[in-house]
Amino acid sequence: MRYVAAYLLASLGNNNVTEDDIKKILSSAGVDVDEAKLSSVFKELDGKSLEDVLAAGHQKLASVPSGGGGGAPAAGGAPAAAGGAAEAKAPEPEPEEESEEEDMGFGLFD
């Protein structure tokens, strides 16, 4: 993943990304470069445009389940104002209701 991220970063300022570009980026972050993995990334991306690769990845991610069950949104889910002008206020806790259950004098694990 680090090699792909470095490739994307290098491609922002340069259309002809080389392995040396990736090595410079990773070494500046203190990451050792695995030549085999770096070669593999360049082999997979050879002759492909980044736009096409990203679009294909986006389509693949669309089919991945995200674990959402369509439940109710979280409390206090109103988005903050643009630019961070408004501070988010934590919702106040609801008062506890008195239990109508009768204490029978023993616990569940007694």
Image (cartoon, rainbow, N blue to C red):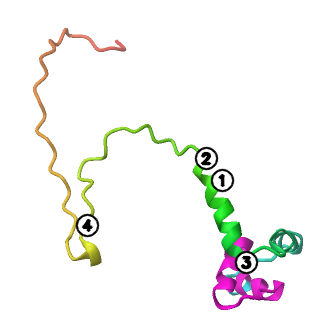
Tag 2 and tag 4, C-beta contact below 8 Å: no
Q: Secondary structure at mark 1?
A: helix
| Residue displayed at 44% across by 37% down | 69
The residue singled out by tag 4 in the image is: 80
The three-letter code of the residue at mark 2 reads Ser
Residue numbers of the magenta segment: 1-26
Q: Which of the two discs, 3 and 4, sits closer to the camera?
A: 4
Q: In terms of secondary structure, where does tag 3 sit?
A: loop
Q: Quadrant of residue 16?
A: bottom right
Quarter location, residue 80: bottom left
Which is more toward the observer, 90 or 108?
A: 90
Calculate the distance from the C-alpha at mark 3 to the C-alpha at mark 4: 37 Å
Describe residue 6's horizontal placement relative to residue 99 as left or right.
right
Q: Is residue 94 above or below residue 35?
A: above
**Front tag of 4 and 1:** 1
Earlier in the chain: of badge 4 and badge 1, it is: 1
Distance between mark 2 and mark 4 Cα atoms = 30 Å
Three-letter code for the amino acid on which mark 1 is drawn: Lys
Q: Position of residue 92 (x, y in %)?
A: 14, 50
Q: Position of residue 31 (x, y in %)?
A: 73, 77
